[in-house]
Every structure is written in structure tokens, then in C-alpha cells.
Image: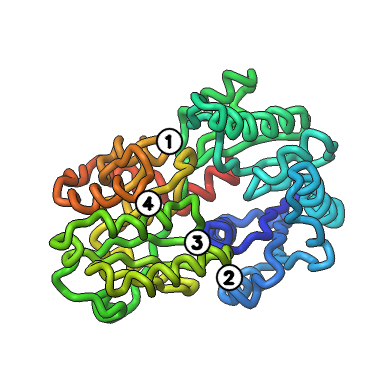
Amino acid sequence: MNILFFDILISGHHSEYIEHVLMYLKCNNKNNNNYYFVVHQDFSESYPNIWKTASAINNIYFIEVDKSLLIGLAVKNRFSRSLNNFKVVDFYAKKFSINVCYLLYFNTFQIALGLKKTKYKIRGILFMQFTNMTKITLKQKYYYYRRYFPLSLCLKNKFLDKIFILNDEKSCSVLNYRFKKNNLFSYLPDPIPNLVPQANFNIYREYKIENNRKIFLLFGALSERKGIIETLLSVNFLNQENQEKVAIIIAGKTKDLNLSNYIKGFIKENKNKTKVQITWDNNFIENSKMASLFQQTDFVLMPYKNPEASSGILGHAMKARKPVIGPYKGLIGSIISEYKTGLLIKDITPKEIANAISNHNNIEEIDENNLNHFLETHTVTNFAKTLLCN
């Protein structure tokens, strides 16, 4: 059997998931299968260790996507974008006579899958499912159906074999019932990897933070939907006593030039206006440093405006047993509430974030038994095994 794993994005969980699948196959390889991974055009340069591991296994092939095929993949029109992305997948699926194709970022392909026919089975991971969205206002209804219709359209494809949803058993049940499917939608544990921290790393020394301050970490690929602007503005709502006890570390890069300029400008302009220490580590953070940051921070900030889907950052925070300040709504809010892993804010505003930071001492102790059960079921092995064996 020829199996294709397709994900040509490279940041955050995209490369992580590819590595998880590869390492599982390394130990659970079926020699009668051929495994093809079509990845980002710079993957070998960005992740040489993963590339080297794959190269040493006879029936695993990593292929960097041909740059000539990337034209039109980022167009604004959603129909064109989906169809153009599908053309790339279909090109490789036909080239390697694929039997089963895993779309590790399924969302982009939904419209095209409803309009195009395939001769190979399709399995994919669906992010940002609509089932946890509210639809009271006109704007909310618009975004709800903006996600609903592409999914309902793709279900017309007879070769659609499995749609995985991260950390959300309830949505799997709801979607199977609504669309009259027999386990098409399947639960997938969002993996929490075991990362080794950097030796001799000290977060206070690294960022020149005064020892008396509590550190609040906002980590990951940065975008406005993650509440970065509201987090920065929140320092204006902290009284002077709290300002002198707080440090905020923003760690990660952004592709948004306007957001980048805003962060830099805010930090520069407010250096003498607030007593809060604000630091932006504007770099790609390697895994060992990421592990150190989560291990040594005091709190993790997750003021996400789109909390409907799972988040790897929440998993890392839970693994490090660090309290989270996150949204009251959505799947993220449900997990924080169920496992008592932090403080929930009802609205993503600077004032609400500031209140949470000021009241961090009121965060309940994490329920260790409950948390341990979550961590035991969200291993990298369990993720890959569920994905490949389901």
C-alpha cells in the first residue's frame, strides 16, 4: 500500500506532527507499505535531524514540495485557494499511486474535496471545527456558516474515509449524528511531546528579569487572534504595585509585518511608562528552549480570540504544570475548566487580562490525578497510533 502524508506548512505543530508520525513508523514499520511525506520546500534545511532519520529508512520518502507548484496557494478567494491546494496534493497522489492520503491540515481542502473526485482514500485532521462556536450575533453566524458549509460540501466525496478532531469527543459525536455518519468523525488526542530542557538555562538571566517578578509567558506563532495586542495593552490597567511584580515574555515570530511593528513600537514607547518588564524574543524557539521556558515561567498567557479548537500550547503548559490564563469559551475553556489548570476570562480585553494577572494568586491548585490521566492519554505514541491505526 502507498500512503501519503501531506503538509507543506512548517511552523508550530505542522513539523511536530510530521516528526511524531515518522518516529512512530520508525518503530512500527510495515515493510509492505511505502510512506511518502510531501513537506515544505525548506524542510531539510529547517529540520535536518528529521530529514536524516527519514533518509535512513528504506520505505519512507520525504519529498520537498516543488516550488513551481506553489503559485496561487495563498489567494484570497477561498474556492480558488482550496482548488489550487488540492491540485498539488492530487499531483503527488497520482505520481506515487497513492492508496490512502493523510491531509494533516484538512481545512484548506474541504471545498475542493466536495467538487473533485479522487480514487484514493482521504483522511485528515480538521482544525477549528464550528461545533464550539456561538452564533448569537450576525457576525458570529457568518463565521459559523463560513466553517459549516465547506465541511458539509466535502462530505459529498465518497472516498472520504476519516476526519480526525483533536481533543474533542463531544464534537465527534455531534458531527456524526448531524451528518448521519458512522464514525467518520473520530477523536484524536492532541500530542504532548517529552522535550528535554536546555542545560543551565535560567529564564531570569536570559531575559534580564528581576528576581522578585512573576513571569507570564505568551508563546507561539504570533497573530492578532491570539490576543497579543490586548496582552500588551493590559499593562495599562495594572496598578503600580502589580506592575513592579510582573514580567511578560512574548516568545515567537509573526509573519504579520504590521503586528511586528506594533509590538516593537509598543515596547519602545512604553519602556518608561510602565513598570512591567516586557520582552519579545522575536526568534524561532527550538524545542529545548521551549521546554525551558514552560518549565521556568510562572504562568502561561493564552488570551485566544478563537478558542473553539485544541491548542498545543495548552498541552505544553499542562505538561509543565503551569497555570494558564485563557478564554472562558470554546474547547480551550472547557479543558481549562475540566482539569482546573488555570484562570478563565470571559472577554478578551486588556482590562480582563489585567484583572487575571492581578488575581493570579486566586488560581486553584491543579488536580494532579486528573491532570496525570490527561497526560497519559495524550502521548505522541497514542496520537500517531490513533491516526494510523484507526
Which is more N-terminal, label 2 or label 4? 2
Secondary element at image label 3: loop
Question: Residue at coordinates 45% horizontally, 48% vertically from top-left?
Answer: 311
Q: Please give the residue where the numbered disc 1 appears in the rendered image.
A: 330
Q: Residue at x 33, y 37 (%)?
A: 346
User: How far across and down, in percent of the image, does residue 275 sit?
Assistant: 22, 69
Q: Residues within 10 Å of mark 1 (few under 14, many from 20)?
A: many
Please name the amino acid that badge 3 sits on: Ala
Image quadrant where one finds the C terminus: top right
Image side of residue 72 versus residue 318, left or right:
right
Q: Amino acid at mark 1?
A: Gly
Q: To which residue does mark 2 refer?
A: 50
What number is the disc on residue 85? Answer: none
Quote the CA–CA distance across marks 1 and 4. 13 Å
Q: Nearer the viewer, residue 42 or 249?
A: 249
Of mark 3 and mark 4, the one earlier in the sequence is: 3
Query: Which one is in front, 85 or 242?
Result: 242
- Whichever of labels 2 and 3 marks the residue nearer the N terminus, that label is 2
Q: CA distance from mark 3 to mark 4?
A: 12 Å
Label placed on residue 221: 3
The image's mark for residue 302 is 4
Labels 1 and 2 touching (C-beta < 8 A)? no
**Residue found 64% across the figure and 35% down from its top:** 162
Does residue 179 appear to the left or right of 287 in the view shown? right
Earlier in the chain: of badge 1 and badge 3, it is 3
- Give, as a three-letter code, the residue at label 4: Met
Q: Is residue 48 above or below residue 317?
A: below
